[in-house]
Amino acid sequence: MKRLAAALCAAAGLSSLWMLMPRFDAALAGVRPAVGREEAIRKAIGWAREHGVEIRGWRFAAQAELDPVLGRIREQAPLSELARVFTPVRIRVLAFNDRGDAVVATMTAEGRPLSFQDRRQNAVGEAAGDAAEQELSRLAGGDSGRFTRTADNVRTLEGSRSAWEWLDPAVKGALARVVVVTRNGRVIQSSYEYSASQEAVGEPPPPRKLQAAVAVLTTACAGGLGGLVFWLLYASLRKRTDPFAFALRFLWIPAAAAAAPFLSGNYQNEALIRSFEEGLVGDTRLLLGISAALVVLLGLFLILAAAYAAVPERHLRLWSPAVLLAQGQWKNRQAAGQIWTGLAGGVLLASAPYWLALALGRTRVRFLDDPALITAPQPAWEALGGLVSAWEVYLAALLLYPFLAGRLKRAWLAGAGAVAAGALVTTMARNVFPHDPGASLAAATALTGGYLLIYHSGGMLGAWVAPLGMHAAVQGIRLAHMPAPSLEAAGWQMLALAGGLAVGALGCSFLLPEADTGEVETQMREAAAAPPRSQTEKLRAELAVARRAQEGLLPQTPPRIPGFETAAVCHPAREVGGDLYDAQAWPGDRWMLCVADVSGKGLGAALHMTMLKGMLESAAHHAPALPVLASRLNRAVAETGRGRMFITMSLMVLDPVRRTAEHLRAGHNPPLLWRARTGECEWRRPRGIGLGLTAGPAFESNLETERLEFEPGDVLVLYSDGVTEDMNAQGEPFGEQRLVEIVRRRASEGPQRLTDAIMEEARAFRGRMELHDDWTLLVIQCVDGAQTGGSVERDR
């Protein structure tokens, strides 16, 4: 149902944007460029050819710039000649080759020429006596008759300079000027530009009281949130380091998003053009850009670590899929569902400013304005920048709201506080209505409230990817409405990229297995409740003593059983564990062998393991029948555990003389018996339920014992579920089949080598993942007597 609701949100958001953006969108000062990167380069090639320069085959860089002064002139006098000729968006194209030659052409958003520079080392070409007049006609077109000549072939260091001007009758103090510099009858530099007095531009409106108050509150809020980040990090460092581990593991995803300007080629464009203007080499500019991206990532790292440290217990379920993702568990249905919800919710949220403009009667919405999209070689990748630039999401939805929710009893107070602070931060980052602070604050409030709703329904990952859906929807539809064919195609590519990510996440939310988030939530809960580090170090020392004591309860060396060889290993997942293996001598030259697993891990499980060890030691003196012993153990565990814990166990009494064993299984993993004569494995599955789950006849009626007979070379493997349920980074368990394959290959080599082989393959399978559960293994082999031919052949 949640997936369907998210799909409806995405459809509603896209249809709203498609309908409202052409009417209200004021990005790029309301200009709809008729040329994009491809069209601008083609025009630059044509103009260069008209100047006698062939630049086809050169390398190109393009950059779009927004002129706010001309934007104000167009607002105040939209019918003026200046507004007709010039556009607030200018596109500059740089062409260069390996010899150091360069040509720069600038044009309006409609493709009209504005300037040309010939920076070749050895300029050659045809000369023209009237080159300056021809350039005036080329730049001004039909308006060339309006111009009055103000300079005629004035000698300068660059060459002969000619200039023309005309005054705009509709705008007082505004004029247009054409300047042409020729050398040896060829144009080496020309420009068509404007100038305007302060009277023509108009005074910017004075700040209103509300605008000034918002600015002060925004600054104070940003400072307060910065202080909160450092306070949380300081408090966290006193007792835990897992927030920094999470932030470091999760940071590679924002790092990939921070590379969006480099992937799209946008930063390379800017670096090349700035290098040409300022005399820097392109590598210097690129290095500066990488340094700036690293500073941004450092800020995100600190905010993510502080946000993780602030997560309250009731929000753990919202963060656990992200933690699993950061740990490398990609097969994670919950994470895919959160990403789908966030992308769809972000699309709907993108339409909020435009609906607000319709409701308030505003006509200009400047939302996610980015002129660089026009000239980016791959504009679709720019949408990924939303994952890095959405500081309001990191600070309000992921940091402040969980922090307040963990300290305020009423959830609505936490939401109100986060919305208020988030609205101020959003206003600073996204001034949707530039000349109306009240409307901008209302839009910021709507956006922040939407982020919090997405956080509640889509979790941490949903709120985090919502800006990606928002950027892709707004910028994709904006580009798709532009008349330039290359920009229209780029818009559809951006929508397709975001749509593909959303559909992929939706499919994964159905196809991937559901991850077990309970373990992660337990770890987060325990880390948050940990004492300060000084106390933690003391506790660790005490746990080390407890671990040594627990290890002392286990057999120090494998038991020496006549006619049998044994090997065993026990690794707790934490400082102390709940697994047990034991081997005790019983009356009648028999041996009691046991592998048991207490539910849970840690100190509680270790205490019950110690109790079980003591009861088995006591039983060794009386040697009761296995069903009787199991019933006594079950009653004791049921009384002490009180339904909150249970123990599974494989219990066996081995008679080495007769090479037989009586086996009982109380809900434990079935032992694996390898027959040396056939080379095949058998699972031993007598009926039984775990100790402590139920008491009385229900336990005893489900208890079954079996008799095992051993032949020379036979191997029996007893183990805990930590062996077969060992997890790799993809969340895949080690499984019983892998255990069978190892036993078949290595059983004939003896218990110790088989134990080592199982451990090594489990460690290689697990990779860098930590132990998922306590890991215990007990291997027994009958060695008395001659080996079978098959076993001898395998030994070879």
Image (cartoon, grey):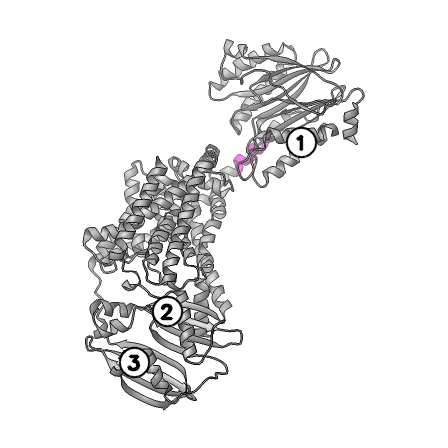
Left or right for 591, reference 216: right
Task: State the residue at coordinates (43%, 77%).
Answer: 49
Query: Which type of secondary structure does the marked residue at label 2 adopt?
Result: strand
Residue position marked by numbered label 2 in the rendering: 91
Q: Are marks 1 and 3 in contact (CB under 8 Å)?
A: no
Q: Which numbered marker is on residue 764? A: none
Residue position marked by numbered label 1 in the rendering: 742
**In the rendered view, would you say 334 is above or below 477?**
above
Q: Which numbered marker is on residue 177? A: 3
Q: How many neighbours does mark 3 have within 10 angstroms: few (below 14), some (14-19), or many (20 or more)?
A: some
Spatial CA span between label 1 and label 3: 85 Å
Q: How many neighbours does mark 2 have within 10 angstroms: few (below 14), some (14-19), or many (20 or more)?
A: many
Figure quadrant of the C terminus: top right
Q: Nearer the viewer, residue 160 or 785?
A: 160
Name the kind of residue labelled 1 in the image: Ile
Q: Is residue 767 magenta?
A: no
Q: Earlier in the sequence, mark 1 or mark 3?
A: 3
Does residue 421 appear in the picture of this structure?
Answer: no
**In the rendered view, would you say 793 is above or below 349?**
above
Left or right for 124, reference 343: right
